[in-house]
Image (cartoon, grey):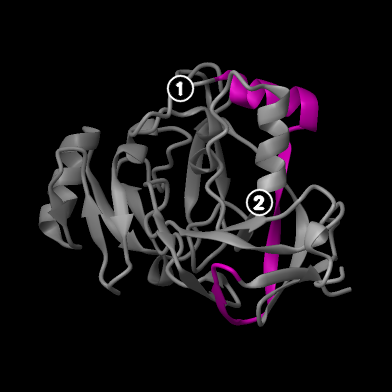
Amino acid sequence: MSKSDSSRFAQVGSLWRYPVKSMRGESCDELRLEERGVAGDRAFGVFDLGSGTIVSAKREGRLLGAVADLSPGKLVVRLPDGREHGRGEILDECLSRWLERPVRLIDAATFGAGTYECPEDYDRDDSELVQWEGPSGSFVDESPLHLLTTADLEQLALERPDLQWDVRRFRPNVVVDAAPDSLGLLQPGQRLQLGDVEVEIQKGCSRCVMTTRHQPESLERQLDILRHVSKAHNNVIGVRAKVVRTGLIRVGDPVCTSN
């Protein structure tokens, strides 16, 4: 890609980190990319003492009502009642009362691989549960990094303007501000340079019930979000990637293919 061609220029449009799995995260001006992914991303999880699983909004949509903030370097969780708590017994007790089950906040770095659950049928939260195990060291579902482009969201909005194609539904780490032809069709094995950082595309990102969930601040429950993505895009929007060269990335950094 020629960086001098403004019609094909791409840059980091926004950056996102989700310190506690399935809680709402934080928009960041910069992120540090390490070998395992974004520093601080999905670094904590809500552990269900009864089932032995890490609670996910795929099963428990209420988690999206809480906000996790790690920006000062110290985790703070704001619950739906507006109260904020750091890690510890008080937060564990408040989470347990809110979710109506005994839970505690745990650290992914020392826990090992987490087990997660989601309904088999995204139309019915009471359908049979499916379990899977994620990687160790972080409570991501699968890959360490998730990228989305503004062109992805714009295309979806053109196809179904009646739906809320808000970036918060897709929970990316990096949103690349790019015209439809800026980067071409991203394929497994292809590398992208984001400022001084390099990442390698692993595969397309399959979407799930998370995209349909209600979220505070105006996002409605919309099952047609996933129905449309499944029908029109083979259930894939965005890409999963791994970090090849670590470092800091910042909003506004140029993005280009490196091979």
Left or right: 228 as drawn, with respect to 71: right
Residue at horizontal 18 percent and vertical 62 percent from the top: 86
Depth check: give the residue in front, 1 or 85. Answer: 1
Vertical side of 90 occupied by 159: above or below: above
Residue at horizontal 73 percent and vertical 35 percent from the top: 155
The local secondary structure at tag 2 comes to: strand
Depth check: give the residue in front, 141 or 1. Answer: 1
Residue 33 x, y percent position in the rendering? 56, 75
Residue at horizontal 53 percent and vertical 37 percent from the top: 166
Left or right: 232 as drawn, with respect to 246: right
Residue 163 x, y percent position in the rendering? 57, 22
Tag count in the figure? 2
* The disc label shown at residue 148, or none: 2
* The disc label shown at residue 33, or none: none
**Residues drawn in magenta:** 223-252
Residue 73 x, y percent position in the rendering? 30, 74
Q: Which residue is mark 1?
A: 221
Three-letter code, disc 1:
Arg
Vertical side of 230 occupied by 258: above or below: below
Position of the C terminus, as image quadrant, is bottom right
Toward which corner of the image does residue 186 lie, by quadrant?
bottom right
Q: Residues within 10 Å of mark 1 (few under 14, many from 20)?
A: some
Three-letter code, disc 2:
Leu
